[in-house]
Image (spheres, helix red, strand yellow):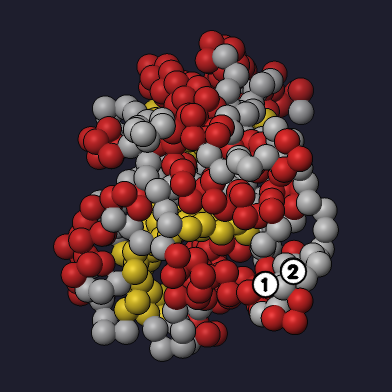
Amino acid sequence: MTKRQFSTRLIHDSEEPRIEGAVSLPIFQSATYRATSGDETTYDDIRYLRLSNSPNHQRLAQKLAGLCEAEAALVTGSGMAAISTTLLSLVKTGDHILAQDCLYGGTLSFLHEEAPGLGIDVDFVDAEDPDSWAEVCRPQTRLFYVETMSNPLLKVPDLPAVVDFCQQHSLTSLIDNTFASPALFQPLSMGFDVELHSATKYLNGHSDIVAGCVASTREHISTITHRLNHLGGILDPHACFLLHRGLKTLELRMTQQCHNAQMLAERLQEHPDVSQVHYPGLSSHPAHQRASEWFGGCGGVLSFSVVGDGARAQRLLNQLTLAVDAPSLGGVETLVSRPAVSSHAGQSAQQRQTLGISDQLIRVAVGIEAAQDLWDDFEQALDASAPQSEVVAMEDS
Ligand SMILES: *Cc1c(COP(=O)(O)O)cnc(C)c1O
């Protein structure tokens, strides 16, 4: 039988056998399970919630493994639980990590604040510049960690070069594929060893849980699961159920989000009060070529700089009526934020400037609303926040 398409697999993979005929897998709200093999019970036979082996965990992990083209997968209590547990499974004291320099804030903090105390060294590299990697690689280097698209400027590493480099130097390649999701990009098929997700974002898609996922070989997943059993960052069965439900519409949502982001990016680019738009779907973006070649779409996150200062950017956010000013991404509702005062607030103004993150930069994580309604909202907010309206806006506040 030919392999079914992704949208069909989202709905039907790992759903059989249906327990008691239930079309939707029920929630197994039980902390522990009766022993099945009597006197011969071994550690592997024990079913207990912290061991992530309830029917909700097993079915969901099996489904995610299939969607990521992996041998196995594991769901976790958050994206950070997936990332930290995986890193702690693959490196030990004395080891060295190569990491992309513009990672998700939580991952960066983990590498900056947790790794040194454990005797793990990290070097940060420009993941778009393969020629710069060899000089920081050491005999103790174990892994190379990158993200599919960076926040908030949507940089795309030279992904095939990362895979090649890791093969040449016997490193494990890890990729946080949250921004693309398996609907747009399959890193394991490109040769990456471990794929990580904040399932809080696109996989779940409804801004109502935090969850994480790791997909890889059976061997890696078994090692990481064993570590998670100790660290305890598991997902509860009700959150498993919500993630399982949300996952089924991943492709539908992603298609609409890519469409909305492309349309918003194009219109923003033409607006006189917008100085720059960052979205790989635009031919002006440095990663346009790579993204078109490797990804099935450029995702739902874009960012843009508004003409003026940080106060103007904040007025713009305050004027939006559909888009909600909140961190996170990947939900059905459009969210906006200013990286300078949210994701990158912990860095100095100097550091932000080096990274290209100005006070006027606005990140948009588009939802699945009608594209025209979204544009109307941004257009009125751009007008209402313009400097000539400043006096009025300030009187309002
Ligand atoms: C949100 C996010 C994380 C962290 O996930 P949580 O579910 O919040 O723990 C990691 N990586 C990326 C790219 C993210 O966007």
- Quadrant of image for the C terminus: top right
**Total count of labels:** 2
In terms of image quadrants, where is residue 102? bottom left
The answer to whether residue 29 is seen in the rendering is yes
Foreground disc of the pair 1, 2? 2
- Find the distance from the CA under tag 1 to the CA under tag 2: 8 Å
Dividing the picture into quadrants, the one containing residue 184 is top left
**Residue to which mark 1 is pinned:** 45
Question: Residue 136, position in %: x, y?
Answer: 26, 75
Q: Secondary structure at mark 2?
A: loop
Q: Residue flagged by tag 1: what amino acid is it?
A: Asp
* Image location (x, y in percent) of residue 124: 36, 67
- Residue wearing tag 2: 36
Quarter of the image for the N terminus: give it: top left
Question: Between residues 296 and 25, which one lies in front from this camera angle?
Answer: 25
Q: Position of residue 33 (x, y in %)?
A: 79, 65
Q: Earlier in the sequence, mark 1 or mark 2?
A: 2
Q: Is residue 46 above or below residue 154?
A: below
SS at mark 1 in the image = helix
